[in-house]
Image: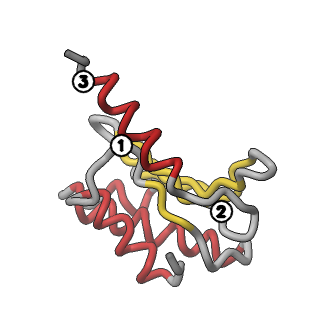
Amino acid sequence: MRNKIEKFIQRKKKVRTKISKTSLRPRISVFRSNRYLYAQIIDDAKGKTLVAASSQEKEASTLKTNIEKAGIVGEALAKKAAKAKIKKVTFDRGGYKYHGIIKALAEGARRGGLEF
C-alpha cells in the first residue's frame, strides 16, 4: 500500500497533466502548509513566477479564520496579476481537494478579476 505522500504526488501529477501549459494562460499554483497558504502565477513556457501572494502578508495576517485568509490571498493575487496585465489563468489545485481553503482562494481570485 502506498503511503500518504506518494498518494498526494500521484494526485498532483494527475491534475497537472490536465492543465495546458501555454504562456497565453499561465497557471495559479497553490501550496498549503500546516500554517500558511501560498499562491503564485507561473509561466510554464519560460519557467518563471510572474506574481506571488501568501497568507503571511499584512492584509491576511490580521484575520482569524483560514478561509478568510485564503479569500484575501486570492484577491491580493488578482490585484498583483492585474498590475502585471494578466487576466486569464488556469487553476492548478495541486493534490488538494477543491474544498475549503483552496475553494476560498479560487473564489477570492475570481472576485479580484481573474478568469479561469
Q: How far apart are marks 2 and 3 (CA)?
A: 29 Å
Cβ atoms at labels 1 and 3 below 8 Å apart: no
Residue at left offset 73%, top offset 77%: 85
* Label 2 SS: loop
- Sequence order check, earlier mark of 1 and 3: 3
Mark linked to residue 4: 3
Query: Which amino acid does the dot numbered 2 rest on?
Result: Pro
Does 77 sit left or right of 10 as displayed?
right
User: What residue is disc 2 on?
Assistant: 26
Mark 2, other Cα within 10 Å: few <14 / some 14–19 / many ≥20: many
Q: Is residue 11 above or below residue 89?
A: above
Query: Which amino acid does the dot numbered 3 rest on?
Result: Lys
Query: Which amino acid does the dot numbered 1 rest on?
Result: Gly
Residue at left offset 66%, top offset 68%: 25
Q: Does the image show residue 56? A: no
* Label 3 SS: helix
Q: Distance between the residues labelled 1 and 3?
A: 11 Å
Mark 1, other Cα within 10 Å: few <14 / some 14–19 / many ≥20: some
Q: In this view, does 14 lie above or below 23?
A: above
Cβ atoms at labels 2 and 1 below 8 Å apart: no
Q: Does the image show residue 1? A: yes
Q: In this view, does 77 lie above or below 102?
A: below
Does 66 sit left or right of 48 as displayed?
left
User: What residue is disc 1 on?
Assistant: 95
Residue at left offset 29%, top offset 67%: 104
Measured from the top left, where is residue 76 in percent x and y?
Answer: 50, 68
- Sequence order check, earlier mark of 2 and 1: 2
Foreground residue among 43 and 55 = 43
Q: How far apart are marks 2 and 1 (CA)?
A: 18 Å
Measured from the top left, where is residue 108 in percent x and y?
Answer: 38, 73
